[in-house]
Amino acid sequence: MRLRGLMRKEVLQIVRDPSSIAIAFLLPVVLLLLFGYGVSLDAENVPVALVVEQPDAATAHFAGGFLGSRYFAARQSFSMEEALQSFLRHEVNAIVYLREDFSANLKRSEAATVQVIVNGVDANNARLISGYIDGTWNEWVRQQSLASGLGAGMPVQVQQRIWFNSEVRSQNFLVPGLIAVIMTLIGALLTALIMAREWERGTMEALLVTPVAMREILIGKLLPYFALGMGGMGLSVAMAVWLFDVPLRGSMWVLFGGSALFLLTALGMGLLISTLAKNQFVASQIAIIATFLPAFILSGFIFDIGSMPPVIQGLTHVVAARYFVAILQSVFLAGNVWAVILPNAAALVVMAAVFLGITRRKSQKRLE
Amino acid sequence: MWGRIFALTLKEFLALLKDKKGRTVIIVPPLVQLLVFSYAATFDLTRVPYAVFNEDQGFAARELLAKFNGSTNFYEAARISHDSEIAPLIDSRKVLLVLHVGPTFSRDLLSGRSGSLQAIVDGRNSNTAMVVLSYVRSIVTAFNNSWILSRDLPKPSAQLVTRFWFNQNLESRWFIVPGVVGLLTLVVTILVTGLSVAREREQGTFDQLLVTPLRPVEILIGKALPGFIIGLGEASLIMLLAVVWFKVPLRGNLATLYLGVFLFLLSAVGVGLMISSLAVTQQQGLLGAFLFIVPSIILSGFATPIANMPEVIQTMTLLNPMRYYLVILRGVFLENTPVPLLFDQYWPMAVIGLVNLTIATFLFRKRMN
């Protein structure tokens, strides 16, 4: 009964200052729209300079592979000088260089060399571009040896199978990860200030003199925001499935359960920050530092956790988003893989319990 | 006038630093985060767990698989002998890769045909999958070359020689650490400036400022300077660590670098004060800070290239000061880019900074009257 009263107060506060409603519903939609389209690791139309010092039939055949590919936006040029200039100005990411003796060497089977220069600053992108160039090159070599009747080229050939995401769309794993990052933000934004605000405005003292227990105050704060957060989560999942065409191979219920656990953890963390800081300014700063960047970098959403140094891997265990990313990526792309879902869900339960437990302990009904 | 501004700046510093919690929040996290993120944020894979499914008894298969075992990038987590064992291993993420060698592999190879190595990869993170496959391909290419050499097979009539400029060994860290410098400069500056006015307003001390002889512009400068100075100090410290601790080569010129840092701070402080003068409560300030920081990091080219974004979003990133700052940081650190080539990065930041500061001053004046 008392709890109902408290929740009513909280709901009234939410309705009067609709910024919480905007945070819960508008923010995920805007951010997911922006990032879902904006964040991609699939390079297409990579600008490449194709330098052919002496064009003839053989070089034209070679260049055709680049000009026709959807991976490259190749521009031809006849001097290396010019190509280097645009390379340094970042107008092209790579140069493919055929010297004037290319065709002659090719005819004499004298190891005609094709030089490739790739800008390595963005190492990941450079590796990708170099892979595309290798692919185009291999295709050309295959056609060459078929034409000259030498038979297939290399002794060992790699046949690749990419499971769960055969078309290698990076959005398929980035969008579920983004949901985890965005919901981390929202959880923190919703609750990071609510306790600190009551302390700062002095209304906490008013609450303390009422007969309600601290537990009731906390639950009364948590539940309305939980409902808001779940609404935002539902919107995000709907967008992932219908707007971004991410396949949802697991069951809706598992997704729902995982989301609820994660949201509880995220809200719990916000409450804890709020309770510990007791001061909106510091609470805000902590919320900015402790939520977004760790969820972005340490959750495995984009950077592989298995490849981090052991110490850092240990640290990622306190980032709740890490468990949620694992659950989301599996439920969306692979299905209900219990071997992944159960341990991660258990970790979320533990984290939520710890956050809420500490919050409970730290918020005593007294003024220091 | 400068005396008054100095006094206000001093007061701002005191307000920021006198509280122990506040002091810690500004100084400790950026340094910790530089260390943690610089180690964590890498696309390079080490010790990729893989399983071997070898149906071939021949030595060619053994020799090829030994190359994987010997590579530091891979780590053999399981050996399997049946098709049905593949799915559980990959599903549960125990391995990222299964290498399958068919029963005729060695025979094919010895009789001059092509043998095939099947690589099954977990595509849940498609970028990781692509990186794993590129490692597999480079090991197979090395194997092919030595196989051709050792058995005197006809050499291919052409060869591809690829070189990576500026970052020969494709170390992600060289790309990421300058990015982290940018990230943290941004966060610290917004942290210091974004909420400062809202706090005064909520605590009622803003009214006290109004009755002082300070003019609005002076108050604004007094609020801007701490953000600027703290941002400059932390950026310098972080760049020093990047060079000394992470051994990222600093190939360019310090003046070129600092011109970029200066202009970026101008734009970040401008945005911070703009948020600050718009926000009536600290909660709004926090929301504003998040709404600026999050997109400007995710859409900055820090982790995913701007060139991969759709046209519309690429155009939107032109408003993002981080975008220019990262190009300057990476350009000066790794490519020794000269000032003239960076001109197109400098001026947009200056414009963003000036526009925001002007609007902030205007809003300020309006609020004060």
Image (tube, rainbow, N blue to C red):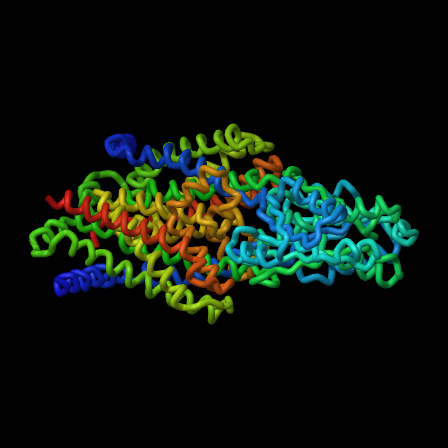
- Vertical order, A353 against A307 (above or below): above
Q: Residue at x 70, y 61 (%)?
A: B71
Residue B143 falls left or right of residue B196:
right
Q: Nearer the viewer, residue A106 or A296?
A: A106
Looking at the image, residue A243 sits to the left or right of residue B205; the answer is right
Q: Is residue B202 above or below residue A225?
A: below
The image shows residue B29 at horizontal and vertical percentages of 38, 60
Give coordinates of residue A54: x percent, y percent. Answer: 70, 53
Near-viewer residue (A126 or B139): A126
- Can residue A47 be seen in the rendering of this structure? yes
> In which quadrant of the rendered view does residue A164 lie?
top right
Name the quadrant of the C terminus of chain B: top left
Rendered residue at 62%/56% (across/down): A79
How many dots with numbers?
Answer: 0
Q: Which residue shows up at 28% across the image and 56% down it?
A: B192
User: Residue A226, image x and y in percent?
Assistant: 38, 35
Q: Nearer the viewer, residue A223 or B38?
A: B38
Image check: A99 left or right of A86?
right
Q: Position of residue B134 (x, y in %)?
A: 67, 52
- Above or below for B367 versus A368: above
Residue B81 visible in the snapshot: no
Q: Nearer the viewer, residue B102 or A2?
A: B102
Residue depicted at 62% across the width and 54% down the height: A95
Residue A17 picture quarter: top left
Question: Height in image: B313 above or below B44?
Answer: above
Position of A45 with respect to A109 (left or right) is left
Which quarter of the rendering shows the N terminus of chain B? bottom left
The residue furthest bottom is: B244
